[in-house]
Amino acid sequence: MSNSKVVIIGGGVSGLTAAWELTRRGHEVMLLERRDVLGGLARSTRLNGKFMEVYYHFICGGDRHLIELVDELGLADKLHWQPGLTSYFVGDRLYPFSTAGDLLRFSPISMLSRIRLGLHGLRCRRMTDWQQIEHLTAEDWLVASVGSEAYEVVWKPLLEVKFGRYYQRISAPWIWHRLHRFSRSRRSALRPERFGYLQGGSHTLLMALSDEIAAQGGVIRTGLEATSLAFAGEQIAGVRTTEGYLEADAVVAAVPLPELVTMLPTDSPYRHELAAIDFSNVGCVRLALRRCLTDSFWVNINSPRVPFNGLVEYSNLNPWRDYGGSEILYVPFYLHPDDQRWQWSEAHFIEATIAGLNVVEPEFDESWVVEATVSRDWYAQAICPPHFSKQIPTLHAPVRGLFVLDSTQLYPADRNLSGMIGLARSLARMMGEDDGAPSPRLHPHTAAKRK
Ligand SMILES: Cc1cc2nc3c(=O)[nH]c(=O)nc-3n(C[C@H](O)[C@H](O)[C@H](O)COP(=O)(O)OP(=O)(O)OC[C@H]3O[C@@H](n4cnc5c(N)ncnc54)[C@H](O)[C@@H]3O)c2cc1C
């Protein structure tokens, strides 16, 4: 395909990266974003006149697609690396959990369990053949590997952070990959992991991308929603939007799968295939505080008195204190749409967060809070059961000219910015190479390897 008219639906990092790559290859690109701001899950709002992400974002040492893109966009001097301390709040105490020494001193579990946890971490670092555990749930695999005690105290809360009441459905490879990815941010077991952040947050990257797209002649329309796809026989023909019809030779759907489902004809088998994948939503409280609560970047929480399973003290990673002196703390609530907490009002989310933080740090009270915001997104996290790799959609949909970018395609990796950048770049290369016809079951991993 060359010099085609391409409509990209979705102005998150994947849609923007695809738009940049395709404009550079000479395509006529129009990107549609429903919101008034770009960025999707990596979007920002203003705090004290500066942009601050609505959800925390950190970068791991192995995030090579993001690091390469940052370099290509001339932003390398804005990427900083910093040790990020982790701790666990168990019962009523905070325990450091960043190094091998911290693990050996982690008294909520027996010495035998601590040793099993450590050995399992080392095995995961070396292991690459995740297919051998695809039939297992994370719970079964972890209990067999580290024992029930370490699972209950250490791993279960982590799974609950992401999957709420559906944590028992999650596949073993998903949790394996998370361990594997994080271990690549660690230089030695004696030192904490190092994480990266961009000065100005993801906003810095997203704005540089949108400037480049405009400079190459691409068009970005915010506040414009795609409502359905139009087909001519087996070929994509265009996109219907809230402001009319757009003709297209190719369409890239860079939106969560359930959004794509609503754009497909109701009798399409492809629609039914995609609709079988279940997602959780996310609600996240972002607090600007007068002071930090802990010295950790990441705090896992295992306490019946705290109504959430983790908190992220972003200021302990990114010391770039240009938010009017405030310290930034996030508390995520991943909630399935059938969880009644998803219906909570903003005030309710903030109240529950403040009450929970007061348990973690009894000195903390409302007077520490300078500003509180609540952000919500539908379909933020796919629920990936055993054998999930057989369910995920390919980059090229089974319709001529329709392409799909979605975080599920990163499996067994969790959603992440770098992975989506890598997929978007693979897709643009693939669109340049082929004639627009669907390549039967071309798996995203295969496409990435064809680089
Ligand atoms: C709480 C949280 C923390 C995270 N932390 C990290 C982290 O630390 N590190 C990391 O690498 N990743 C992190 N992520 C993941 C990262 O944010 C995502 O992987 C990435 O932003 C996904 O980008 P995307 O472009 O694929 O999709 P999205 O960001 O979901 O973008 C899709 C876009 O499509 C738009 N859209 C939807 N429907 C339509 C329509 N009909 N018409 C027009 N537009 C439409 C949406 O408004 C949205 O802007 C985190 C995510 C969350 C929720």
Image (spheres, rainbow, N blue to C red):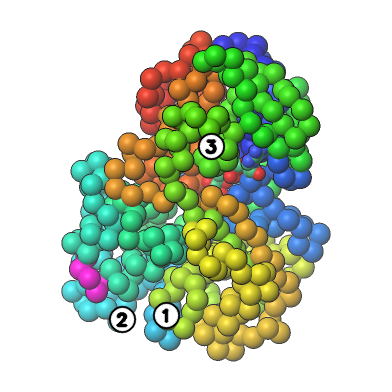
Asked whether, in this view, residue 154 is left or right of residue 281, the answer is left
What amino acid type should be assigned to the residue bearing mark 3? Val
Q: Earlier in the sequence, mark 1 or mark 2?
A: 2
Say whether residue 5 is visible.
yes
Q: Earlier in the sequence, mark 3 or mark 1?
A: 3
Q: Position of residue 191 (x, y in %)?
A: 39, 63
User: Depth-wise, is mark 2 or mark 3 nearer the camera?
Assistant: 3
Q: Is residue 76 above or below residue 27?
A: below
Q: Secondary structure at mark 2?
A: loop
Q: Secondary structure at mark 3?
A: helix
Residue 76 falls inside the magenta stretch: no
Between the residue at mark 3 and the residue at mark 1, the CA separation in whole angstroms equals: 38 Å
Q: Secondary structure at mark 1?
A: loop
Q: Which residue is mark 2?
A: 108
Mark 2 neighbour density, 10 Å: few (under 14) some (14–19) many (20 or more): some
Say whether residue 192 is visible.
no
Q: Is residue 424 above or below residue 82?
A: above
What amino acid type should be assigned to the residue bearing mark 2? Pro
Q: Which residue is mark 3?
A: 261
Residue 303's tag is 1
Look at the numbered discs 2 and 3 and tell me whether their residues touch, using CB distance below 8 Å. Answer: no
Q: Earlier in the sequence, mark 2 or mark 3?
A: 2
* Residue located 52% across and 58% down the image: 337
Judging depth in this view, the residue of 436 and 311 nearest the camera is: 436
Between the residue at mark 1 and the residue at mark 2, the CA separation in whole angstroms equals: 12 Å
Q: Position of residue 254 (x, y in %)?
A: 58, 35
